[in-house]
Amino acid sequence: MDARVLQAMRRWPNVPAAYGWLRLDEAGRWRLEGQLIGNRRLAEFIGRNYLADEHGAWYFQNGPQRVFVELDHAPWVLHVDTQGQLRDHLGETVTLDGTGNLDEEGNLVLGTSRGAGLVSGTALLELADRLRGPDGTPLSFESLAASDDRTQPILSLDWAGQHILVERLPKARVPARFGYVRIPAPA
């Protein structure tokens, strides 16, 4: 967290939290009242001060005020860089923790060293050739969409020497599975 943010928090300790203003979209971009934040320095400032509270609600500490973040899907959005490394939307390299879920819309969420991360659309294309069915055969996204079996683990992902079992889970249950709040609200 930025030093001036910590200083502001000490100076004004009782500023009420804000809700419904800031959102993290499925591409890993910040949106303020629905509008894309195009200013790189502001986006980086938000990223440096992006945290979760004890209930799994993510927020941006804006000086003395917590601005809670609505998540289109997960608190982290994963991309594959030009060297083949998995990075979150802030550019940090992440490691996988061996967990994964695929929802009914085809969204792949992986557990990482930083928390649950939605695999971005472009990263999903990069990972496609690493997906395998229960019998080890390569899978296509078309075959995943056509599968009627929503109860059994349907695929695995081989990434960076790890074999990750990916289970189907409805989108509405993914936040509870990974311990985060998608749309924070005042208590």
Image (tube, rainbow, N blue to C red):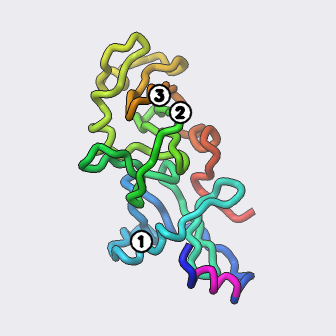
36 left or right, relative to 180: left
Q: What is the C-alpha distance between the residues marked 3 and 1?
A: 31 Å
Residue at x 56% of width, y 72% of height: 1
54 left or right, relative to 102: right
Q: Where in the figure is residue 101, as x and y percent of width and height?
A: 50, 33
Q: Which residue is mark 1?
A: 44
Residue at x 63% of width, y 58% of height: 57
Q: Measured along the vertical axis of the image, is residue 90 above or below residue 37?
A: above
| Amino acid type assigned to the residue bearing label 1 in the image | Glu
Q: Which residue is mark 3?
A: 164
Q: What is the C-alpha distance between the residues marked 1 and 2?
A: 28 Å
Please give the range of residues in magenta: 5-10
Magenta stretch, overall SS: helix
User: Given contact means CB atoms under 8 Å apart, are the residues at marks 2 and 3 in contact?
Assistant: yes
Looking at marks 2 and 3 on the same chain, the residue that comes earlier in the sequence is marked by 2
| Amino acid type assigned to the residue bearing label 2 in the image | Thr
| Amino acid type assigned to the residue bearing label 3 in the image | Ile
Q: Nearer the viewer, residue 48 or 108?
A: 48
Residue 15 image label? none
Residue at x 54% of width, y 30% of height: 169
* Category of crowding for the residue at label 3, using alpha-carbon neighbours closer than 10 angstroms: few (below 14), some (14–19), many (at least 20): many
Q: What is the C-alpha distance between the residues marked 2 and 3?
A: 6 Å
Looking at marks 1 and 2 on the same chain, the residue that comes earlier in the sequence is marked by 1
* Category of crowding for the residue at label 2, using alpha-carbon neighbours closer than 10 angstroms: few (below 14), some (14–19), many (at least 20): some
Q: Secondary structure at mark 1?
A: helix
Q: Which residue is mark 2?
A: 99
Q: Residue pushed farthest bottom? A: 11
